[in-house]
Each structure stands twice: as structure tokens, then as C-alpha cells.
Image (tube, rainbow, N blue to C red):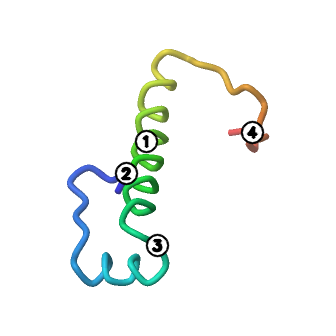
Amino acid sequence: MTTTGQTVDDKFFATLRTHFSEPEIVELTAGIAMENFRSKFNAPLAVESQGFCVLPAR
């Protein structure tokens, strides 16, 4: 979902529906979209980590 132009087929949604309800799929999608937004927004503005997850040095 975070790849530009990514599509999801009916088979994928059928698999999701075996694990999640429709509202849960919407919430999951919204959460992924928000994380994607943050990754695109924070980097150019040099927003620093708040230390919740220690990442390895680059």
C-alpha cells in the first residue's frame, strides 16, 4: 500500500476478510496510510524520532 501506484486485488481482500471485519480493514488501511504520510512528511522537515523505537545507525 505504501508503494506509489500499488493495487490490491480481490484475492487479497478475500484473505483479509478471513481475519478482519470491514471496519477493521478500513482502520488497518488508515493506519498504514498515516504511517506512510509520516514517513514522507517527517524526513524532509528533519523531524526527529521521539525514541520509541531505536533504529540502527545508517
Assign a secondary structure to mark 2.
loop
Q: Which mark is residue 36?
A: 1
Residue 54 vertical placement versus 48 (above, below)? below
Check contact, mark 2 vs mark 1: CB within 8 A: yes
Q: Residue at x 32, y 83 (%)?
A: 14
- The amino acid pointed to by label 4 is Ala
Mark 1 or mark 4: name the one nearer the start of the chain: 1
The residue lying toward the viewer, choosing from 40 and 31, is 31
Assign a secondary structure to mark 3.
loop
Q: Residues within 10 Å of mark 4 (few under 14, many from 20)?
A: few
Q: Residues within 10 Å of mark 2 (few under 14, many from 20)?
A: few
- The residue that disc 4 covers is 57
Quadrant where the C terminus sits is top right
- The residue that disc 3 covers is 20
- The amino acid pointed to by label 3 is Phe
Give the percent coordinates (x, y) of residue 33.
39, 45
